[in-house]
Amino acid sequence: MNDLPDKLSRRTFATGLLSTAVLTAFGKNEQKAGFDLMKEVRKFRKLDAYATSVFTRESIEQHLDFADRYGISKLFVANPMTQIELTPAQFREHNNKVIQAVKAHPEKLRGHFTVNPRFKKESLDEVDRCLDAGLVGTRLYQQVKINDPIYAPVIEKLASRNILIFMHGECQMGVGGYKMKYDARKVPTISTPGDFAEVAARYPEAMFQFAHMGGGSDWECMCRTFEPYPNIFIDTGGSNNEENMIDFALQHLGEDRLFFGSDASFYQSIGKIFASRLTDSQKEKLFFSNYQKVLKKGGFHVD
Amino acid sequence: MAKINRRDFCTAAIGSAFVAGAGRLSASPLPATPDNEAQKAPFIIDTNVSLGQWPFRHLKYQGAGALGDKLKKHRIKQAWAGSFDALFHKNIDAVNAALTKECAAYGRNFFLPFGTINLAWPDWEEDLRRCHEVYKMKGIRIYPSYQTFDLTHPDFGKFFEQVAKRKLVLQIVGDMDDSRNHHPIVLARDFSYAPLTELVAKTPEARVQLLYWNHRVSAKQMDLFVGTPNIVFDTARIETAGGIDAMLDGNQHHKDRVFTFGGIERTLSEIPWGRNSKPVPAERILFGSHAPYFPVEASLFKLFESDLTLEQSKSIMEGNAAGLLQG
Amino acid sequence: MWIDINAYIGHWPYKQLHDSTLTGLIARMDRFGIDKAVVAHLDGVHFKNSQSANEALFAQLKSEKSLQKRIIPFAVINPAYPGWEADLKKCISNGIAGVRLYPQYHDYLPEDPACVALVRKCRDANLVVGLTTRMVDSRQRSWLDLPNVAGTEIGEWSLRQFMPLVREVPGATYFFLNVANGLAVAKEDAALLKSDKIIFDTSGRSLGFMPDLVQQYGAGKFAFGSHSPLLDYVTGMLRIESLRDSEATRAQKDQMRSGNAIRLLGTHIR
C-alpha cells in the first residue's frame, strides 16, 4: 500500500483532480471476505484523546470496559460538561474529581482540567495546581469563546508550557454565531471552527484540539475551515459516523492532525475509522502516534 | 430586413437540417448528409443546462450522456452546464470537480462546466480560484434562492469583482422550478437582483447573465436592467406566445393589456414578473433551455414562434453567447 | 453469514456519496465480508413519485443478474401520492421483500389513513415495513433538508412518532432502522415493541451499550444494518462483533448477523 504524502494541502490536492490518484491509492487497501473486525481493531495501540466527561461510577466503569474491549491504552478524561457559570470553586471541584479518578485508575486514565478565563488569576493558578497534581492538558468548554481576548492569558500560559489546548467546538447551524437564523437555543459563547481559526492564526505557536469531528457538527465545513491552520488538530469523537468522514478529514487535514477520540461513542468512533480507506500506517498515527507526539512536546507522553 | 418566423424556420430560410432539429423535434436526428441549406443554418449554444442529480424527480435526459445526445439532435453545438448538486451540497468544490469530470468525459468540448461558489461557506475564494485556474471554467453559476446567500451578502461585492477580474461569466439563477411545484421540504428563499445595477456600474468589465430570472424581476427592475448593457438574459422561462417578440419591442402590444395575478388586475408596469416596457435589444438575449428540467423543445419553439429577423435569430441562438464568452 | 438489513444505492441531495451504486455497494460488502443486503433506492426518499426510483433499482438488478442473489430489494412507497397501490403491486411483481417509508420526507404522518392502509397491505402480502427514525443527524444537516432540528421547537423524530402506526397494525413485520433519540416509547406501547416481528438494525445511535441491550431485549431484537452509504459500513458490525462471549453466545451473534433477518424476511431470501 502506498502511503499518502505527509501532508496534503488543499492547494496541492486540487491540482488537476488529484483526488483520483489518491483514491486509486486507497483502492489498493481492499479487504477480502473473512474480514475479522475485532482482530483488526485490536491490532492498533490506542490513546483516546477525548474520553468521558461524566464522572459517575457507572460511566467510568463503562469506559474502562470499552478500553479493555478495544485495546485502548489510555483514556484522557475530564469534567467540563456543565451549563453552570463555572466559578473558581466549581472548576476546582470538577478538576478534583478528575484528579481522584486518575489516582483510582492510574493504569488507564489520564486527566484534563477545565478553567473559566473570566476568573483570570484563579484560572492561571488552577493550571499550575492541576499540572502539579498530574493532569496533562485542558478540556475547555463553552463559558467563553476561544478567540475572546479574555482567553489570552490562559492560552499564552498553556502555549508556553506546550500544553494542547483542547476545547469543545460546534459547527451546527444556529449555534455560536453560525447561521443563527436556525437558532438552536444554545448559549452564544460556543466556539465555532471560525473562532478556532482566528485564535490559531493569532497564536501560531499554540496547539489546539477542536472537539469533536463526529459531535453532530458539519465536519466538512470544519475540515475545510481548519485546512490552512497546521496548529489545529481534530479528534474523531462523537456519535456521528457518516461514510467518508475520516477520508475527507485525511484529504483536507493530512494524516498528522487527526487524533482518535471517542466522546463516549466507541462504536461509531472506531467503526468509521475501520470503514475508511486509511492505510495501516495512517491508522497507527491516528490511534496513537499523532497524539503521543503532541503530548511529548510538553512532556506528557505515555510510556 | 429578412424576418424569420416559424413557417420560415420550417421551410426555406434556415433549411432542412433545422427542420430536422425543430420541425420534428423529438424524433429525428440530424440528417447524416446535410444539404447546402442545412450547412448554412446556424447552430445553437444553450447557455442554461444542468448535469448532476435533480433530487425530486427522475428526469428523462439526466446526465451528460443522455442530455448531450439529446441536445445535439436539435443542432445545439455547445451547452453551458451547471450541476443540480450545486444547489444542495455544502462541499461545493467536490461538486465542481465532479462537474468538470463529467463534462470532460462526454468529450468534444460540448459541455462547458460552470462551477458554483457558495459565499455562506468558508474559503469560497479558494473555490473560485479552483474553478478558474484548476478546472479552467469559463463561468460561474450561482443559485441564491437555494444557497442561502443573496446579492446583499457582505462578500458579494468582493465575489462579483473577483469573477469580473478573472474574466469569467457570472450566471445568476433566479429559480429552478415553479415555486408552486416545490417539494414540500424545500425552503427556497426569496432574493432580489436589484443590487446588480450598482455593482455592474462599478465593475464595467463584468459579464452577467440572468437565468430563469423572470419571476424575480419586476417590470420596473427590468427597465433598469435594459439600461445596463452587460446584463443579459436567457430564454428559459419567457412565457406566452410571442414572449421574445414582446421583450424585443418593449411589450408595445401589451401596454394596455390588463394582467390578472391572484385575482388582482394589474397593468403592465404593476405586474411582478419581468415584463419590460423598454425594448430589450436582441444582443441581450441568449438561448437557454434549462434542460433537462424543461424540455429543450420548449425553448426551441419559443424561438421559432417569435417574429425575428434572421440576424436576430442567429444572435440569440449562437452569436450572443459566443460573444459573451469572448468578452 | 451476514445480512445488512439497511443499505441503499442512489443519491443523497445534500452531499456527495461514495460508491453509492450497486457495484459500489457490492464492493463494500465484499470488503467487509457481507453476504447479502436489503437495499432500497435512496432517490425515492426525495422523489414525490418514488416509484421511478424503485423502477431504477429493478432495472439495475435485472441488468446485473449475478447480483440478484445478494440483493434483497425493498421499495420506497409514498402513500401520500396518487397511484401508490398500483406502485406497490408493480413492486411486488418485481420481487420486493418489503417497503421503506419516509413520512417526514413525503409529508404525511405514520397514522394517516393511507399509510395505515399501505402497512395493512404489506402485512397481508408478507412484506416487511422499514421505518427509519432519521436519515441524518439534524445538527449537521443541510439548510435545505427537513426543518426538524435537534434542540429547536420541532426536534427530530424518535420511535414514538411511529407507534401510532404500530398500534394500528400490530401484526405487521417492522424493521426499525437507524434508531436515534432513544428507545423509549410510551408505557402502553412498550409491549408492542416486544413483538418478535419487530427488530432494530444496529446502525442507530440509540444502541449505546450493546451488552445491556442484548440482556434487556434479547439477541432476537437486533439485526446487522449499516445505513450505508450515508453512515459507515463498520459501526453496525462492531456493535455485534465486540460483544464478548460472556455477553452473547455464538448462536446469539449469528442471530444478529443474519438469523433474525432470515427469520423475518423468510422466503424472500434466495
Image: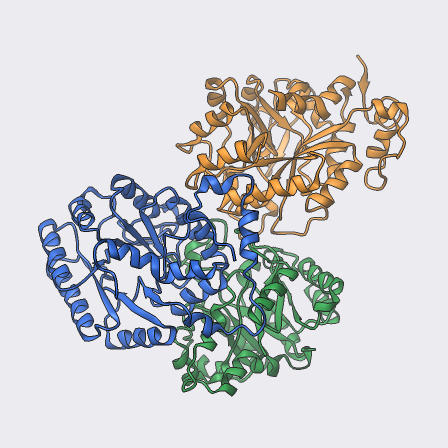
Chain colours: A blue, B orange, C green
With C236 as the anchor, is A70 left or right in this view?
A: left
Percent of width and height locating residue C163: 49, 74
Task: Look at the picture and state if B296 lies above or below A234.
Answer: above
Percent of width and height locating residue B12: 89, 23
Percent of width and height locating residue C208: 39, 73
With A19 as the anchor, is B1 left or right in this view?
A: right
Percent of width and height locating residue A196: 30, 46
**Residue in view at x 86 percent, y 39 percent:** B28
**The N terminus of chain B is located in which quarter?**
top right
Residue B131 at least partly seen: yes
Task: Look at the picture and state if B204 lies above or below C143.
Answer: above
- Count the marks: 0
Question: Residue B228 lies in what quarter of the image?
Answer: top right
Give the residue at the far top of this rendering.
B1
Task: Look at the picture and state if B127 lies above or below C121.
Answer: above
**Residue in view at x 83 percent, y 22 percent:** B40
Residue B172 at least partly seen: no
**Residue in view at x 60 percent, y 24 percent:** B232
